[in-house]
């Protein structure tokens, strides 16, 4: 296969608002540490008023993954909804400047919501608690899915978070059909254990019927395939999906395919900000996969990319990932 | 003196757009390394289109200084013009969240310009080249100067950059008169050698007639007081101003007052991004001064604060400056 795009990602286009907080801030504001919480405009304003000084960087889970593959030189495009406002302009600039194609129509100035943003509260241990105001990103409509773009993709990469929204299931179905009809394959990230709980049946149908490659971490794996231990959960997943990739923080990642399990070791790193670890793991893995590397090497590429992004604030890579791959003898 | 505010800063309220670039990018786009260049909307759009992915942090020279003093627990306020737009909301949040009072009226939605932004292009050696779209910040009007606020300040801190604008000289004059009439004192930073060249006479009048404390670096010193060597320039300045503080990068800072010269050593640091070095030096110095420390200690506080801010991307402190002061035995 040598299509125009190696990976086309679809997800919530967000600008991250990053702020360092004490654990006491999370407790005082009833924020569950380490998970993603959807919030409304009012709560967003309340939290923003209470939190400390922040910095803004383009984010969004699948967008981070696509930016990572682009940084490695992969051929990628991204689909997600932003508004024609200042934060939207920042998002569009950053994804294009990283080398990804992006042509989703912008919501115009009359739209009542604004470009989505995610308040990322980083604790002293590097753990992050996400408070997401979806804004216009949840209004991604089937009309925003360009079937010719999906047909031009070797892989599409679907963000589980995008299941939260009125027409998202329909949009995903349109993307999957167009991709598969042209011989492409479908990958999905489960995004968050609570997201899995909100959409368990729909995710399960999607996985069984359409997904060729499933990304998740151990918490999402347990939520999706409840069992007595991780091994049992992973086997349930592997019975339904060609390639299952489960990340396990400092324990690296497990890749299950064709009855085999590979284990890629994590790269020891001081964790400054865990935001984007899973997103960049997927970037490294998908880069390797679309370049034809074996599963273990793909997993190692994922671990190297994840280690880079947790070593600094923000969820987009800051140093050249290819240089890191070379240093580790992966390419 | 025990006024409500120890320092009130007036300057260009900006959001910084930070991007890492190769030196070849500067050459290809005719950008002079290490200086501040004013650009119009068209050039801003052109550069933004060419530059790589970026992150956004609140900036503005005097605002960085005020944020730094606030982070140290000083009583501060800031005056500068932003618009009622998304970038303006970010600026206002960050300066208040750091602990500074900010009540300058926002330019409303009908204003043709937007909140100002500064494209900060960071070279591999940490040097930064600033391309500034002033936006509404240059429309700071004498009406925006609240005389009771100026009267409540032990020191006002004027940003030289703010001399670029139609009504800025008048606004500065109003601020100075209100401050001095209430027994306050006036500090000025020269900001940039080209800014000095653009306003040499006006700066000279201001310095001779009103300034009690002058901040500059060696390049600005040479532009303001041309002489055969730095010593001679500094002596010319000291003949006109009570306290002269000249920063000299890895050579630390010189403080001239009452016929004496003190030298504060720089703190050795890996330079990641020099943005804000002078701003945070001024923050440390003014904190020390308003707490009654001797000149050498004030200079050392400035050097410690400057070293912190150049050790990471962005011009606002990320670690607790007071902890650093304690580690150095300064408090």
Image (cartoon, coloured by chain):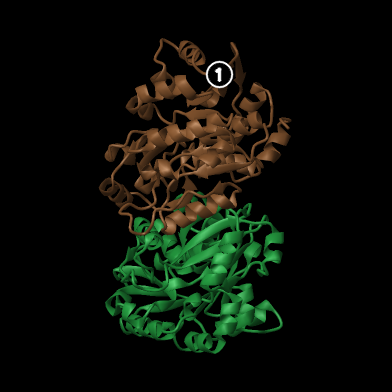
Chain colours: A brown, B green
- Residue B36 drawn at (x, y percent): 58, 71
Q: Is residue B14 above or below residue A296?
A: below
State the residue at coordinates (65%, 58%).
B123
Which quadrant is home to the N terminus of chain A? Answer: top right
- Residue A157 drawn at (x, y percent): 52, 33
- Residue B70 drawn at (x, y percent): 39, 60
| Residue B157 shows in this picture | yes
Q: Is residue A65 above or below residue A294?
A: below
Q: Chain of mark 1?
A: A
- Report which residue position mark 1 lands on: A242
Number of residue marks:
1
Neighbours of disc 1 within 10 Å: few (<14), some (14-19), many (20+): some
Q: Nearer the viewer, residue B290 or B316?
A: B316
State the residue at coordinates (54%, 71%).
B42
State the residue at coordinates (37%, 57%).
B73
- Residue A93 drawn at (x, y percent): 53, 55
Query: Is A192 left, or right, of A95 in this rendering?
Result: left
Q: Where, by quadrant of the figure, is residue A303 drawn?
A: top right
Dot 1 lies on which element? loop
Q: Nearer the viewer, residue B10 or B237?
A: B10
């Amino acid at each position: 296969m040598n299509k125009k795009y190696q990976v086309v990602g679809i997800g919530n286009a967000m600008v991250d608002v990053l702020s360092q907080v004490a654990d006491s801030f999370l407790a005082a504001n009833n924020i569950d540490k380490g998970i993603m919480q959807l919030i409304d405009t009012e709560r967003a304003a309340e939290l923003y008023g209470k939190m400390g000084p922040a910095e803004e960087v383009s984010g969004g889970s699948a967008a981070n993954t696509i930016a990572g593959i682009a940084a490695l030189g992969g051929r990628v495009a991204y689909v997600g909804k932003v508004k024609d406002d200042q934060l939207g302009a920042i998002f569009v600039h950053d994804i294009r400047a990283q080398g990804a194609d992006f042509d989703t129509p912008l919501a115009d100035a009359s739209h009542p919501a604004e470009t989505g943003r995610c308040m990322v509260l980083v604790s002293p241990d590097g753990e992050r608690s996400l408070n997401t105001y979806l804004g216009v990103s949840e209004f991604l409509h089937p009309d925003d899915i360009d079937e010719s773009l999906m047909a031009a993709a070797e892989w599409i990469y679907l963000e589980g978070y995008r299941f939260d929204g009125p027409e998202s299931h329909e949009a995903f179905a349109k993307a999957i059909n167009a991709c598969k009809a042209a011989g492409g394959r479908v990958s999905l990230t489960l995004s968050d254990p609570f997201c899995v709980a909100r959409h368990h049946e729909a995710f399960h149908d999607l996985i069984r019927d359409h997904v060729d490659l499933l990304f998740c971490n151990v918490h999402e794996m347990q939520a999706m395939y409840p069992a007595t231990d991780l091994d049992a959960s992973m086997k349930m997943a592997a019975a339904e999906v060609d390639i299952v990739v489960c990340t396990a923080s400092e324990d690296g990642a497990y890749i299950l395919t064709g009855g085999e399990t590979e284990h890629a070791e994590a790269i020891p790193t001081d964790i400054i900000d865990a935001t984007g670890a899973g997103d960049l793991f997927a970037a490294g893995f998908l880069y390797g996969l679309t370049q034809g590397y074996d599963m273990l090497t793909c997993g190692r590429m994922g671990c190297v990319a994840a280690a880079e992004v947790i070593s600094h604030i923000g969820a987009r890579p800051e140093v050249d990932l290819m240089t890191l791959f070379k240093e580790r003898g992966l390419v």
